[in-house]
Image: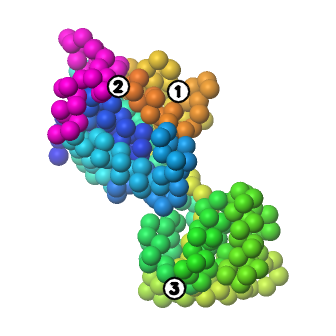
Amino acid sequence: MKSETDVLIIGAGPVGLFAVFELGLLNLNCHVVDNLDKAGGQCAELYPEKPIYDIPSRVKITGQELTDDLLDQCRPFKPTFHLSQQAEIINKKNDKWEVQTSNGTIIVAKCIVIAGGAGSFVPRKPPLEDIDKYENTTILFSIKDKSKLKGKKILISGGGDSALDWTNDLASISDVTLIHRRKDFRASPDSVSKMLDLEKKGRVKFIICEPRSIVGDDKIIKKIICNDGEKDIPIDTDYFIPFYGLKMELGPIAKWGLNLDQNLINVDTEKFETSTPTIFSIGDINTYPGKLKLILSGFHEAALMAQQCFRYCRPDKKLVFRYTTSSKDLQKKLNS
């Protein structure tokens, strides 16, 4: 399948979705590619129910709520999404880019915007034999719907914020056991204190040990065999959820000839353009002096990037800046 658009956005996280909105205000059409099966990026995939506190005007908002709001905001501009696929191969033909994805889709665009967060990300997995056999059934690397864990035996492994936060959260609805290789944690002190308090009250179990093997049958785990340095400890469980963080990979983008700095993409701070003209990078995947990895920083970058994309895509037209508060044309489009 081959399609053509003004701008191809790689990454459907918050910054990529806001880029659709900013480009749409300038009457630029967008296609969006993401290797996940839904929009939202890390916010929707890793912490859909976890609150975010630094989005302007929102005292508190979850990752999924932010995603839903951004999808609503960009919906008037009718972006086309290509999900569950990666942008792999790019070729310049005349003055446009031809991008081929991992499933064979070809998208022709004047500009490319790389908004892939920290790149393609995959969870770090414990080195357990046959772990792949149980993935997404009874071994999970993120929690998308905690209701299905209600009343179940849950074994969580890890010492970071995700492991502690979910241990504390699920304690009210599940039989939770937390394992970690040592007594010290990387998680916030408040989360650790809360977990230890729940342990004293008998509402969670905490064991210092490491997972060594899986006992199960037909994609259903029955127990995890752990070791505390002296002996094996079998732990019965319905679900095993290791929170070992993510491996961030640029993936195919690393081969596109862009100027990189430790797997981040160098950009200018006027247009957020890369070393290759008409290819831009916004969000956590880029780098420049003073860079802050905040969603709101990515929103700012998207607005400036869109201005330069317009100049490339509509070279015969004058760029006229319009406020959404006063432009009747924009208001009509946004309310359609």
The residue labelled by disc 2 is 306
Disc 3: CA contacts within 10 A as few (<14), some (14-19) or many (>=20): some
**Circle nearer the N terminus (1, 3):** 3
Task: Magenta stretch: give its range.
Answer: 307-336
Question: How far apart in space, not on screen, are marks 1 and 2 (Cα)?
Answer: 18 Å
Number of marks in the image? 3
Instruction: Residue under label 3, please give it.
Output: 151
Picture coordinates of residue 133, whole percent (x, y): 46, 76
- The disc, 2 or 3, on the residue closer to the chain's N-terminal end is 3
For marks 2 and 3, give the CA distance.
Answer: 49 Å
The circle on residue 179 is: none
- Give the mark nearer the N terminus: 1 vs 2: 1
Location of residue 129 by image quarter = bottom right
- Judge left or right: residue 202 versus residue 320: right
Residue 313 colored in magenta in the image: yes
Q: Residue at x 58, y 60 (%)?
A: 124
Q: Which residue is mark 1?
A: 266
Magenta span contains residue 227: no
* Three-letter amino acid code of the residue under disc 1: Asn
Picture quarter containing residue 299?
top left
